[in-house]
């Protein structure tokens, strides 16, 4: 038979363990909620910055496309670079 003091100590240890586990779960949920809030805020800021970049890139793309074409191999190289730059600006 287990002495009463040992049995009580065992119950106390189990109770403290349960309380610690509950506190860990609560803190985990709080941290996850805070992290989600911060990620949402960062996402909104990134979306706003992307919108601003797109708005500023559109006139640049139009000007690049409106530049006169040069003849010959140099013109082909410049046209290829211009096309890639315009594509990159549209994708932002």
Image (cartoon, rainbow, N blue to C red):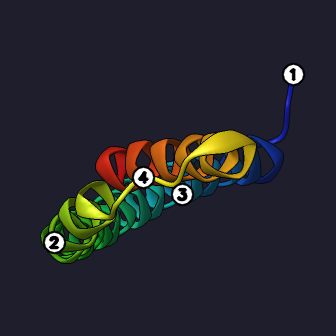
- Residue appearing at x 12%, y 70% in the figure: 55
- Determine contact: label 2, label 4, CB under 8 Å: no
Name the residue beneath numbered marker 4.
69
- Determine contact: label 1, label 2, CB under 8 Å: no
Q: Earlier in the sequence, mark 3 or mark 4?
A: 3
Q: Which mark is residue 24?
A: 3
**Marks 1 and 4, how far apart in space?**
99 Å
Q: Secondary structure at mark 3?
A: helix
Name the residue beneath numbered marker 2.
59
Q: Earlier in the sequence, mark 1 or mark 3?
A: 1
- Residue appearing at x 74%, y 54% in the figure: 9
Residue 50: x percent and y percent? 26, 66
Mark nearer the viewer, 1 or 2: 2
**Marks 2 and 4, how far apart in space?**
19 Å
Q: Which mark is residue 1?
A: 1
Residue neighbourhood size for the residue with mark 3, other residues' Cα within 10 Å, grouped as few (<14), some (14–19), many (≥20): few
**Marks 1 and 3, how far apart in space?**
35 Å
Q: Nearer the viewer, residue 57 or 11?
A: 57
**Marks 1 and 2, how far apart in space?**
87 Å
- Residue appearing at x 28%, y 54% in the figure: 65
**Marks 2 and 3, how far apart in space?**
54 Å
Q: Earlier in the sequence, mark 2 or mark 4?
A: 2
Residue 11 seen from this side: no
Q: Secondary structure at mark 1?
A: loop
């Amino acid at each position: 038979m287990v002495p009463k003091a040992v049995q009580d100590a065992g119950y106390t240890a189990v109770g403290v363990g349960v309380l610690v586990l509950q506190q860990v779960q609560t803190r985990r949920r709080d941290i996850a909620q805070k992290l989600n809030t911060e990620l949402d805020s960062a996402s909104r800021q990134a979306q706003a910055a992307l919108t601003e970049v797109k708005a500023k890139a559109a006139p640049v793309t139009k000007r690049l496309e409106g530049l006169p074409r040069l003849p010959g191999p140099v013109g082909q190289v410049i046209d290829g670079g211009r096309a890639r730059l315009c594509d990159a600006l549209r994708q932002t």
